[in-house]
Image (cartoon, rainbow, N blue to C red):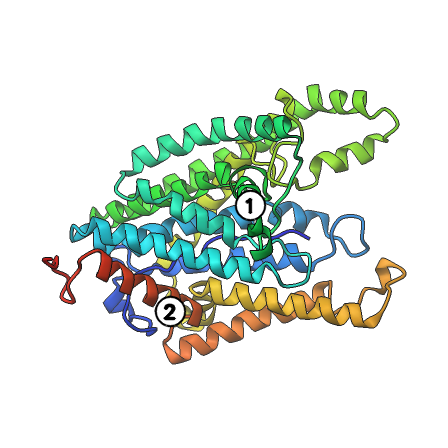
Amino acid sequence: MREDTNTFAIAKPQESGRVPTRRESGTGSQGELGRMVGIDFARFLAIIGMFCAHLLPPAGIPGHISWLSSIVDGNASTLFAVVGGISVVLATRSYLERGHIAAARWAMAVRGLLVIAIGATLAQAPGSIVVVLVYFGVAMLGSIPFLRMGAKGLLVWAGVLAVVGPILNAQLRGMIGVVGEGGGVSWPQWGEPLVALRAVFVTGTYPVITWIVYVLVGMAVAKLLIGARRNAAEPRLLAWMAGVGALLAVLAVSASALVYGLFGRAAVIATMPVESAEAIDGLIGSPGFGAPLSPEWWALALQTPHTGTTLDILRGVGIALFVIASMLFLAGVLPKAVLRVLEPIRAAGAAPLTVYTLHVLAAAAATVALASVGQIDAPADIPWWYLGPGILGVHILGALVIGAILAALQRRGPLEALVSSISGAVARRLGAVATGGRRRRD
C-alpha cells in the first residue's frame, strides 16, 4: 500500500490552540484568506483518499476496486501537497505583511524541521505505509527562498521544475543504479546522512526534486486567492482554476494514453516478450516509486501515478486545482446551517497532522496484531480490521470523531497547535518581533 498525503503546515501563527471564529479569521464572503473553510474541505477529501490508498486491497488482492484506485492513487497525495503550499503562505503571511522577513523564514524553517522530526519518528512504526512527512518537511524548507515571490514567479518556477525535475530524477537514478530507496526515511536511515539526503531529494518515494512543484503551485494559488478576495474577484478566479485544472488533467491523461498506445507499449513488449499484454498494461498503470519507469522518452511522457513525470505532475496539479476551486465555491454558497453540520469535517481537515499521525499509529497497531495472528495462507484470509472497507470505515469515523471533538472545543489539533506554538516562539525571538508585532530593536 502507498502513502497518499502531504501537507501539514499550519494556517496561521497563534498563541493558543483555540480556533478563531469566522469573524476573527475573516472567512466570510468579504473577508481575506484567513482560514478558508473550503481549503479544509479539500484537505479532508485528501485525507479520505489517503485512507483509501492505505486500507483498501491493492491490485491483485480480492476486493480491489480498480476505479477507486485510479481516483486516489497519486491524486490524494498531490492534493495534500498543493494545499500544503497554500498553508505555507498562510503560516508566514502575517509576518511578511508586517515586514518581518526574517521571522517568516524562521517560522517556516522551524515548521519544516518539526515536521521532519515527527516524520522520522512516525516512519519507524511497523506497517506498509510510506510516511511522507520527512519529504514534505524538506519541501517546506525549500519553500523559504520563494516566500516573497509573486504568483507568476512561483508558477514559472513550478513549470520549469515540472519539466526539468523528472528528467534529472530519471537520469540520476540511472547513473547511480538506484531504482528507489528511502521509504519513509526514519531515524536509523539518517545514520548514513548522504544516502538519506539522496533519497529525500532524488531517489526516494516522494523526491523533493519533483514534489516541491506542488508546494510552489499551492503557494501561487494562495497568493492569487488573497488578491482575488481583496478585489472581489474570487468567483472568476475559482471558475478559472476549475477550468484550467480540468483541462490539465484531461490533457495529461489523453497525451499519456496516446504516447503509450503508439510507442510505449511496443517498447515494453520488446524488452519483456514473455509477458502478456494484460500484465504489461497493469505494470504501466501501477503506481511507481517516485521516478519515471524508464529514462526513455516515452516513459517520461506517461502520467503513471507516483512517477513524477511532467504529465503525472500536470494531472495531479489539475485535479488539485479543480477540487480546491470546487470546495471553495461550495463553502461559499452553502447556508450557515449546513456549514455548522459540516463543522466536524472542516475541523478534521484543519488537523491533518494529528489525524494522519493517529491513522498511521492505528494501522501500525493492526500490523502488530496481524503478526500475532500467525501466517496468512491466502489473501482472502486477511482480517477485516487490517484491510478492506470495514477498517476504512473505522478510520473515516475516527477522523470525524476527532473533528467533532475539536469543533466542539473550538480547538486546533494538538500537533498543529504544538508546531505552531514552537515555530511562532522561535520566529518572534530570532526574527526580532516584539509582542505587539513591532520590530524589536537590538
Residue in the image at 57% along x and 28% along y: 172
Q: Tag 1: residue type? A: Ala
Image check: 58 left or right of 178?
right
* Cβ atoms at labels 1 and 2 below 8 Å apart: no
**How packed is label 1: few (under 14 Cα within 10 Å), some, or many (20 or more)?**
many
Image check: 48 left or right of 436?
right
* Labelled disc at residue 196: 1
In front of the other: 286 or 360 = 360
**Can the viewer see residue 324?**
no
Above or below — where is 83 with respect to 391? above
Q: Give the mark toward the camera: 1 or 2.
A: 1
| Helix, strand or loop for disc 2 | helix
In 3D space, how far apart are the residues under numbered discs 1 and 2 (Cα atoms)? Answer: 29 Å
Residue in the image at 78% along x and 57% along y: 63
Quarter of the view holding residue 385? bottom right
Q: List x then y, in percent, for residue 70.
A: 65, 45
Q: Tag 2: residue type? A: Ala
* Labelled disc at residue 123: none
Residue in the image at 26% along x and 46% along y: 228
In front of the other: 333 or 296 = 296
Quarter of the view holding residue 351? bottom left
Which residue has dot 2 on it?
A: 417
Q: List x then y, in percent, for residue 240.
A: 37, 39
Image check: 387 left or right of 404?
right
Q: Earlier in the sequence, mark 1 or mark 2?
A: 1
Q: List x then y, in percent, for residue 221.
A: 35, 44
Above or below — where is 7 with respect to 303? below
**Can the viewer see residue 190?**
yes
| Helix, strand or loop for disc 1 | helix
